[in-house]
Image (cartoon, rainbow, N blue to C red):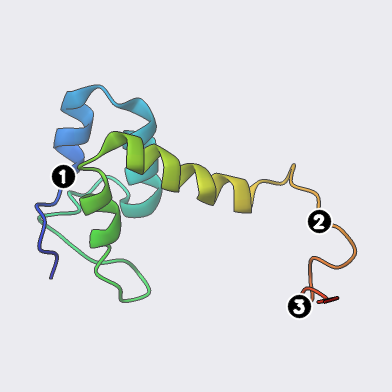
Amino acid sequence: MARLREVSLSEIKASGYKAGAHIFRMVFGDRDSVAEPGLPLGTSGNWWTVFALSLDTFDHVSGLFAYYQSPERKLGPHDDASPAYSG
């Protein structure tokens, strides 16, 4: 259970924060993630709803997910293995 208040999809929509509303819809669909918590794989999903308390933080962390999932991101020849240490 989160110790901080969770932000619902309706609050995100009311704030006019379009990027947040888009991400909430991608993660939770059109349901209210606070009233109906949970994700298909069994996690509570409250990470997203709590991080939305700080829009700067939410932008930062959701931007990282976009970076990791971007089809534009090019991997080098060693990115699929453990980094080599030469010390």
- Disc 1/disc 2 C-alpha distance (Å): 36 Å
Q: Position of residue 3 (x, y in %)?
A: 10, 63
Q: Residue furthest right?
A: 77
- Given residues 19 and 2, the one toward you in this image is 2
Q: Earlier in the sequence, mark 3 or mark 2?
A: 2
Identity, as a three-letter code, of the amino acid under mark 1? Ser
Which residue is painted at 12% across and 71% down in the image?
A: 1
CB under 8 Å between discs 1 and 2: no
Q: Position of residue 9 (x, y in %)?
A: 20, 41
Residue 30 lies left or right of residue 72; in this view the side is left
- The residue to which callout 1 is attached is 8
Q: Earlier in the sequence, mark 1 or mark 2?
A: 1
Residue 59 lies left or right of residue 3; in this view the side is right
Nearer to us of marks 1 and 3 is 3
Residue 61 lies left or right of residue 43; in this view the side is right
Q: Element type at marker 1?
A: loop
- The residue to which callout 3 is attached is 82
Identity, as a three-letter code, of the amino acid under mark 3? Ser
Nearer to us of marks 1 and 2 is 2
Q: Position of residue 63 (x, y in %)?
A: 50, 42
- The residue to which callout 2 is attached is 75
- Disc 3/disc 2 C-alpha distance (Å): 13 Å
Q: Quadrant of residue 16?
A: top left
